[in-house]
Image (cartoon, rainbow, N blue to C red):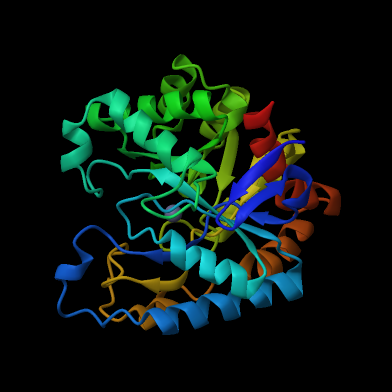
Amino acid sequence: MASVQTVTGTCALEDLGRTLVHEHLLVGYPGWQMDALAPRFDRREAYRRAVDMLVQVREQHGLRTLLDPCPMDLGRDVEFMAEVSQASGLQIICTTGAYFEEQGLTYTFRNLPLDDIAAIYEKEITTGVGETEIRAGAIKVATGSHRVSDYERKLLTAAARASVRCSVPIITHTQEGTCGLEQIAILTAAGVPAGRILVGHSDGIDDPAYHRRIVAAGAFIGFDRLGIEVILPDEIRLRNIASLVSDGHGDRICLSHDACIGAWLGRPIFAPETPIDPSQIALLLPNWSPLHLFTRVIPRLRELGVSAAAIIKMTDENPARWFGAARG
Ligand SMILES: [Zn+2]
């Protein structure tokens, strides 16, 4: 029987259930500790906030699994994930992999051979992250805006090797909804079946032709920044989802928010109006929460003509099909 690695053990593919494919418990950009003006990180408070929210989404909306694709260099804390998973009753999956060149912590991987980076990813997948026995269940790759750098290409190729050897799927970060097709080309050229790739943040651009090229290539497409309306209004995202579904591509779409559920480490540098206090994010992005899909997005998709069955496909079936493609 096919299984998926979570931070607390393995889970049968059919037990993944309703899944959010891209949410974070903690996020901190490299060097966040240097920002002495930012509020102090309170781990207990972050833990309580994350557990409260995940219990709510589980009990009220039937969520069973959450993938936190935090790259190694963005404050990834797999022990925090395991603690939150145990307390909330939600299955959580972590990833190996690193962020894109402009915003990641690049010095070490720039200087390591590609083979060693692939071996590091494999180590995190097969034996665990650091000294823990918490194993990654997927690989994260990332590219910058409009162009894939040599560094990013090297990390994508390393990820492809680890994916082929360990049979785990690949989730991507794209910047401004660009380079998804280049990611697919690099990964598939290195042997990864396209159905094992989820091109993340594809909702960062209002370009239906781009969306169709991604699904035509056989990859999954992430409309995974629901509620981040400083990038694009949700209404545009939802119209693009409805149009993909009506064109018969509903079996390729995964939905999520890229929300930060526990805490920002340092100040949240992601928008022009960067607030110094993370509690101010809610004022800037009132809908940026794992509840948003269930309370506002799904009712609006129904109004736009998306059937209940098509919604279940996106929330419950496609994530398992993506993980299943890695096992098949
Ligand atoms: Zn993310």
Q: Is residue 166 above or below residue 57?
A: above
Provide residue 262's location: percent of width, then percent of height.
46, 73
Task: Tell me: 309 left or right of 271.
Answer: right
Q: What residue lies at 16% left-to-right and 80% top-to-bottom? A: 37
The residue positioned 53% from the left and 30% from the top of the image is: 166
- In terms of depth relative to the viewer, which is nearer, 100 or 206? 100
Residue 249 visible in the current orientation? yes
Quarter of the image for the N terminus: give it.
top right
User: At 33% from the left edge and 43% from the top edge, which residue is drawn?
Assistant: 98
Q: Residue at x 50, y 17 (%)?
A: 191
- Quadrant containing the C terminus is top right
Taking the image in four quarters, ligand 1 sits in the one at bottom left
- Residue 302 figure quarter: bottom right
Q: Picture coordinates of residue 124 (x, y %)?
A: 43, 42
Asked if 328 appears above or below 47 in the picture, the reply is above
224 on left or right of 43: right
Give the quarter of the image for residue 185. top left
Residue 127 pos. (x, y %): 47, 42
Q: Report x, y in % for residue 7.
A: 55, 56
